[in-house]
Image (tube, helix red, strand yellow):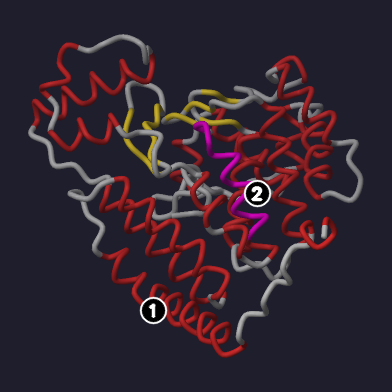
């Protein structure tokens, strides 16, 4: 009797028909949800709440694993538009001034209470209270430039896990790189060691994932980080004269010397050429690196501009500037 008292009743098998029906209902519900997701994303505007965004992001996590790569890319583009719509705020000029003052002070001194909070638009008040939710952040790009943005982590967390390996690696790494500003106006905000590390990463990425759908963007990032490494930017140049090693920023010189030791790397070859270039006298440069200049360029180019052109030619650098139509430095993909 004791044995009988301790025995648990046998679990009853679920009738097969009921189980099948439950699975069918779940499939139909998920299919309907994913069918409606584009419509739901398009309905997000500057009057919706962070809760509505979070709901769509949860739905995306269910639908992305069931989507083709082309569908995933389409939804990714829609998500960018969705956040742009959500973060759009119409302000009067005084409201714009109030926002910039408040947002800048908040990003610099988050514990200080601001007296002019009430001067902000109701939408600004809402977004500032809910920053940190639904991947919304206040981004301080320096020099008083503060605004809302979708965190680069968004695509890395919501989209990347369900995408092909090449795209996953691209998004996750660019998200990490762009969490903090790379530059502000014409000044680099990251050290030469980080610049060299990123340049090497994008070179290796292109070697490992030659068929990536983000190949063109990876090439652009490699070219830009190469320029940052060997030339810098207007307000943070690597050198003015490139006449010898003492004319080069010491932190840049250290990284370029280390880079020249790397095996099987075109960047390393460029670093080696750089070290050769700074040993050349002005006369040697004129002889070994003849520039094809128009009569106008010959008259207008300063000595430092001429030197930069010689450096570009000697190292085989791309004569690129920051693209006005493609931003690769503020999100986890190029926008």
Instruction: State the image quarter where residue 282 is shown.
Output: top right
Between marks 1 and 2, how big is the CA–CA gap?
Answer: 42 Å
Residue at 72% across, 35% down: 196
Magenta range: 168-181
Asked if residue 245 lies left or right of residue 230, the reply is right
Q: Is residue 118 above or below residue 171?
A: above
Residue 1: give x, y in percent of width and height.
Answer: 82, 60
Magenta-drawn stretch contains 296: no
The residue under label 2 is 222
Q: Secondary structure at mark 1?
A: helix
The residue under label 1 is 32
Are the residues tagged 1 and 2 within 8 Å (C-beta)? no
Query: In which quadrant is the C terminus drawn?
Result: bottom left
Q: Nearer the viewer, mark 1 or mark 2?
A: 1
Residue at 61% across, 35% down: 228
**Marker count (numbered):** 2
Q: Is residue 135 above or below residue 42?
A: above
Residue 275: give x, y in percent of width and height.
Answer: 81, 31
Residue 126: give x, y in percent of width and height.
Answer: 22, 34
Q: Secondary structure at mark 2?
A: helix
Residue 48: give x, y in percent of width and height.
Answer: 22, 50
Asked if residue 323 lies left or right of residue 125, the reply is right
Residue at 80% across, 63% down: 4
Q: Is residue 44 above or below residue 301?
A: below
State the residue in front, 32 or 300.
Answer: 32
Residue furthest front in the image: 1
């Amino acid at each position: 009797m004791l044995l009988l008292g301790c025995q648990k009743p046998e679990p009853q098998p679920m009738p097969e028909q009921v189980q099948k029906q439950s699975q069918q209902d779940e499939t139909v519900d998920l299919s309907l949800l994913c069918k409606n997701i584009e419509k739901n994303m398009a309905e997000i505007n500057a009057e919706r709440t962070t809760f509505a965004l979070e709901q769509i992001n949860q739905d995306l996590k269910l639908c992305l694993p069931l989507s083709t790569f082309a569908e995933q890319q389409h939804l990714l583009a829609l998500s960018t538009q969705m956040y742009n719509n959500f973060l759009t705020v119409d302000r009067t000029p005084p409201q714009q001034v109030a926002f910039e003052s408040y947002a800048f002070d908040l990003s610099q001194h988050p514990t200080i209470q601001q007296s002019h909070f009430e001067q902000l638009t109701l939408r600004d008040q809402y977004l500032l209270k809910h920053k940190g939710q639904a991947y919304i952040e206040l981004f301080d790009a320096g020099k008083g430039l503060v605004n809302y943005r979708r965190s680069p982590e968004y695509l890395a967390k919501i989209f990347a896990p369900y995408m092909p390996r090449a795209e996953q690696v691209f998004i996750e790494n660019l998200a990490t790189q762009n969490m903090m500003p790379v530059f502000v106006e014409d000044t680099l905000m990251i050290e030469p060691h980080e610049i060299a590390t990123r340049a090497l990463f994008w070179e290796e990425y292109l070697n490992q994932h030659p068929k990536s759908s983000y190949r063109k963007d990876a090439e652009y990032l490699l070219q830009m980080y190469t320029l940052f490494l060997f030339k810098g930017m207007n307000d943070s140049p690597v050198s003015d004269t490139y006449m010898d090693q003492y004319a080069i920023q010491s932190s840049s010189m250290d990284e370029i010397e280390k880079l020249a030791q790397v095996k099987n790397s075109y960047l390393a070859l460029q670093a080696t050429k750089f070290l050769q270039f700074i040993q050349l006298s002005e006369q040697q440069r004129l002889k070994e690196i003849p520039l094809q200049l128009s009569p106008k360029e010959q008259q207008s180019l300063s000595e430092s501009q001429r030197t930069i052109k010689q450096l570009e030619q000697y190292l085989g650098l791309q004569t690129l500037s920051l693209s006005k139509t493609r931003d690769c430095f503020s999100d986890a993909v190029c926008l």
